[in-house]
Image (cartoon, helix red, strand yellow):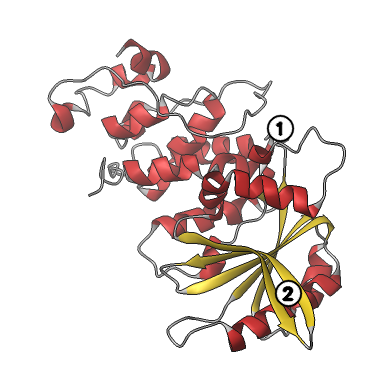
């Protein structure tokens, strides 16, 4: 209880307790669930502007219990904002924290697009494979950041050694199917690094790992894999396969020229084995809070989503 009011002192200004309807009494916070999350360097800037008491009333007790487990105040402020704007349930908040949405947003070159994609995933909109593809993928759990050099085989092995974490990074619904899947055409063998299946979208995801910058020939190689897979492997009940090229870096213009006009969906994403400092994300957080301050008391607050889901 003391921790709650230390982190959210403005709750005492909000009047009646927002938690009475949920629990009758306020229980002590349980021990935080261990979440595999990278250490992020703390910002040297001032603390984020605290939410006012009126806005805090839109967060349920269950939401706040999850939020006070986050030590970084900017990280906590980011998820507070998203809960308020997107009306996340407690379970959706947990899922977005586990998927490293904050870290991914800080790393992305198009931060707003990452946030909007997460909001669409949390909505009731029909799921599309393009909504599940991320850029970048945060693979700090593979433990390769300290190695001066590593191969595609090293990266593949590290991903499979941490398959549970990698599945979480890929997103919900993916199932691991194969590694180094051999395909034979004209008595020549080729090997697809990783194969996954999405149980809701009913399609395969073929992943090719590149420990270098994207090259235009990579798109042609992936298109070859997809053509083979569609003809020889895909069943009548399945949707066409999708390709994902994971590269250490990419030039977006080169990517657009390489994949433009292909019959199959091919995505090119960067992967990162270490996290830099998130800086610009703080500006997004403060922008949202300044907007709420300007709006003031113009309309009654709407509560977030349910505190839990069945």
Q: Residue 127, how many percent across, how many down?
A: 44, 68
Where is residue 69 drawn, in percent x and y?
A: 43, 25
Instruction: Identify the element where label 2 is drawn.
Output: helix
The image quadrant where one finds the N terminus is: top left
Q: Which residue is mark 1?
A: 277
Contact between labelled residues 1 and 2, with CB atoms less than 8 Å apart: no
- Residue carrying label 2: 222
Label 1 SS: loop
User: Picture coordinates of residue 125 (x, y %)?
Assistant: 39, 67
- Front residue of 122/113: it is 122
Give the vertical position of 10 relative to 173 (above or below): above
Q: Is residue 119 left or right of residue 284?
A: left
Residue shown at 51% from the left, 36% from the top: 78
Residue 234 in the figure: left or right of residue 19: right
Which is nearer the eye, 221 or 289?
Answer: 221
Q: Position of residue 38 (x, y in %)?
A: 61, 32
Q: Nearer the viewer, residue 17 or 246?
A: 246
Q: Residues within 10 Å of mark 1 (few under 14, many from 20)?
A: few
State whether residue 85 is above or below residue 296: below
> Outermost residue, front direction?
187
Mark with earlier residue (2, 1): 2
Q: How far is disc 2 from disc 1 in space, using C-alphas?
A: 33 Å
**In terms of depth relative to the viewer, which is nearer, 218 or 176?**
176
């Amino acid at each position: 209880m003391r921790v709650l009011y230390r982190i959210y002192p403005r709750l005492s200004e909000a009047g009646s307790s927002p938690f009475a309807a949920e629990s009758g009494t306020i229980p002590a916070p349980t021990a935080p669930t261990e979440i595999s999350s990278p250490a992020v360097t703390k910002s040297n800037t001032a603390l984020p502007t605290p939410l006012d008491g009126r806005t805090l009333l839109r967060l349920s007790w269950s939401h706040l219990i999850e939020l006070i487990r986050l030590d970084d105040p900017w990280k906590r402020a980011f998820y507070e904002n998203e809960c308020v704007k997107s009306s996340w349930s407690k379970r959706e908040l947990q899922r977005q924290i586990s998927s490293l949405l904050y870290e991914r947003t800080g790393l992305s070159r198009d931060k707003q697009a990452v946030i909007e994609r997460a909001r669409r995933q949390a909505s009731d909109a029909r799921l599309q494979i393009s909504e599940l593809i991320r850029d970048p993928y945060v693979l700090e759990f593979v433990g390769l950041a300290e190695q001066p050099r590593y191969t595609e085989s090293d990266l593949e092995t590290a991903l499979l050694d941490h398959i549970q974490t990698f599945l979480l990074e890929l997103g919900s619904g993916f199932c691991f199917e194969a590694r180094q899947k051999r395909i034979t055409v004209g008595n020549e063998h080729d090997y697809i690094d990783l194969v996954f299946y999405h149980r809701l979208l009913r399609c395969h995801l073929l992943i090719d790992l590149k420990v270098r910058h994207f090259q235009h020939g990579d798109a042609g190689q992936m298109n070859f894999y997809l053509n083979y897979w569609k003809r020889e492997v895909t069943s009548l009940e399945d949707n066409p396969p999708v390709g994902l090229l994971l590269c250490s870096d990419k030039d977006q213009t080169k990517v657009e020229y390489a994949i433009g006009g292909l019959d199959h969906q091919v995505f090119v994403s960067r992967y990162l084995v270490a996290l830099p400092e998130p800086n610009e994300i703080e500006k997004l957080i403060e922008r949202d809070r300044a907007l709420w301050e300007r709006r003031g008391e113009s309309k009654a607050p709407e509560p977030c989503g349910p505190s839990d889901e069945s």
